[in-house]
Image: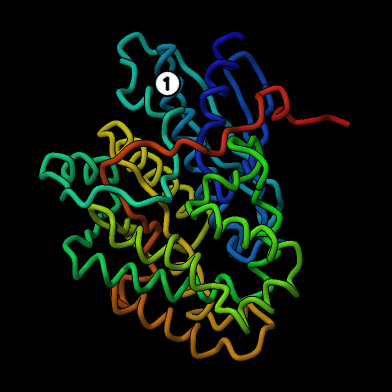
Amino acid sequence: MDAIEQILDLARWAPSGDNTQPWRFERAGPDHVVIHGFDTRDHVVYDLDGHPSEMAHGALLETLRIAATAHGLRADWTRRAQSSARPILYDVRLTRDSELQPDPLLPAITTRTVQRRPMSTRPLTAAEKADLVTAARPFEVIWFEGWSERKRVALLNFSNAKLRLSIPEAYKVHSSVIDWSVEFSEDRMPGKAIGVDPLTGHIMRWAMASWERVDFMNRYFAGTLAPRLQLDLIPGLACAAHACLLAPKALADTDDYVAAGVAMQRFWLTAERLQLRLQPEMTPLIFSRYVREKRRFTAKAGMESLIRHVTDSSEQLIGAARLPNAAFLCRLGAGPPAISRSVRLPLDSLWVKRA
């Protein structure tokens, strides 16, 4: 591999929703790469207006920038002016810089994972928090620490998970992104990485074979309870803290969300460098935005009160005035890295295919 290929081979490890990897690469010159940024809004309820995918684009661009420093190269990027065209095109130019030092976050690129299981409740140190706050700038970090604050976020996610697991629009996503048979997945999420015990995992796998099974389990056997306890309530309490990254202004357009992805990735990689594990908690923010903009996201009847509860709880947690600025919500804490994890498609499969 030459330098550009080595840089892109690291950049592809950037996080994306459910490991969708909404990007492809094009070599446009010896020092010029074009990133083709896609989104999944047409079939993923969580990818509202494609903005979560745009955050993934930002994470990719920041990871590429970090990777380039290993070769003494500075990576600068611009987004091509487009109206509503997809994919979004980002031009990346690489320039030799003899004074550039390798970024200290380089080793964290490939070891960063999602840890969905309980973590240590050891409080974050002042030094750890300072490093994380610095990494997120110019985004502000709100901390939710201590038992009562962690409980507030855990209960929000516990309610939000009932919503997620009760609507057919989310079922379509979940049933397509989980690969139950593997420990590592190149393009989905391994079943062993979900974070539930074997019995619950077996029941979930059986139920998710069809929406009718899921709906039946939810109606008559409290089918959402065990996953919500194991994936949301218990881990939400068993962590050091929850954190929310606030943008300097309300998130409104592609550039805002790309910038949010940059901040998210630096925050996450810094946590990994500090040997802190992290799990995103994004869906309350996404569902709250649907409600703020009076946009319906499920055809299932009887969800109105639960949707309102999740939105009200999000506003009480973060503040109604600040919620439009909320870019990233997560939990984090010390502990071992996830054993089972999503990996990535090989670089050879990520080049733009020309007709």
Q: Residue at (66%, 31%) from the top-left corner? A: 345
Relative to residue 134, is residue 201 drawn left or right? right
Which percent across, then down, holds residue 225?
49, 73
Above or below residue 204? Residue 37 is above
Q: Foreground: 240 or 200?
A: 200
Residue 42 visible somewhere in the drawing: no
Q: Residue at the front extreme?
A: 199
Q: Residue at (60%, 60%) from the top-left corner? A: 47
The quadrant of the rendering that contains the C terminus is: top right
Q: Amino acid at mark 1?
A: Arg
Q: Residue at (75%, 31%) from the top-left corner? A: 352
Q: Residue at the right extreme?
A: 355
| Residue holding disc 1 | 74
Which percent across, then down, holds residue 333?
27, 47
Which percent across, then down, holds residue 181?
67, 42
Q: Quadrant of residue 343?
A: top right
Residue 169 visible somewhere in the drawing: yes
